[in-house]
Amino acid sequence: MERAYIEDQTFERRAFSDKPLEKGDYECCSFSSCDFSEATLSEFRFIDCSFTACNLSNADLSKASFQEVEFRECKMLGLHFEHCNQLGLEFSFNNCQLNHASFYRVKLNRISFSNCQLQEVDFAEANLNGARFEECDLLNAIFDNTLLEKADFSTAVNYSMDPDNNYLRGARFSLPSVTGLLDKYNIEIL
């Protein structure tokens, strides 16, 4: 069966729970104010697409492919990015809610998170070398055996991670949030 190929299309204010998006390859498409919550995006391919003000919470991303995809002002709660097709995986997030998402063992060199809520996100064993966490809230995010070489946390808040259990060479931090690197010691900083 031949896959659908959709190029240069704009999708606005569509609820894909009512009428599912046709499975296929979407290139240079834009999705605005669309509802993908709990939708099945398994084996979809998105190339050079943008999602603006969309709800993708709890969508099934099994074997979905995202290449050069931008998410802006999206609600993306509980997504499992580790289930995505890892080949060519590349996206950026701006003003998004990604609480309870998982990037377990995902390789995302130089990924950019800007003004995002990343509360209770699982970054365990991920490769986030060169990642930027600009103005992000990382309350209770999990960093365990995570590669964070040259990652930028200088404007991020509420992060806590064990420097002995994560690779942090060249990572950037700033006061007062850098104290999150000392949380494991249960000490009081005045």
Image (spheres, rainbow, N blue to C red):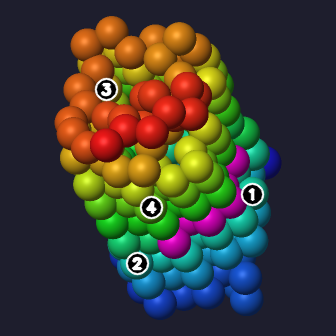
Q: Say whether residue 70 is left or right of residue 75.
A: left
Q: Say whether residue 174 is left or right of residue 184.
A: left
Question: Mark 3: few, some, or many residues within 10 Å (few <14, many ≥20)?
Answer: many
Q: Give the magenta-colored segment's residue range.
A: 75-80
Q: Is residue 77 above or below residue 20?
A: above
Q: Earlier in the sequence, mark 3 or mark 2?
A: 2
Query: Which element is circle 4 on?
Result: loop
Gap in angstroms between the C-alphas marked 3 and 1: 28 Å
Q: Which mark is residue 151?
A: 3
Labels 3 & 2 near each other (Cβ < 8 A): no
Gap in angstroms between the C-alphas marked 1 and 2: 19 Å
Labels 1 & 4 near each other (Cβ < 8 A): no
The quadrant of the image that shows the C terminus is top left
Judged by depth in the image, the label closer to the viewer, 2 or 4, is: 4
Residue matched to label 1: 60
Specify the amino acid type for callout 4.
Gln
Would you identify the image quadrant in which residue 84 lies?
Answer: top right
Judged by depth in the image, the label closer to the viewer, 1 or 4, is: 4
Residue 43 point in image, percent of width and height: 70, 46
Seen at 25% across and 31% down, the residue is 173
Q: Earlier in the sequence, mark 1 or mark 2?
A: 2
Specify the amino acid type for callout 2.
Ala
Question: Mark 1: few, some, or many residues within 10 Å (few <14, many ≥20)?
Answer: many
Gap in angstroms between the C-alphas marked 3 and 4: 17 Å
Gap in angstroms between the C-alphas marked 1 and 4: 20 Å
Q: Nearer the viewer, residue 85 or 127?
A: 127
Q: Earlier in the sequence, mark 3 or mark 1?
A: 1
Residue matched to label 2: 53
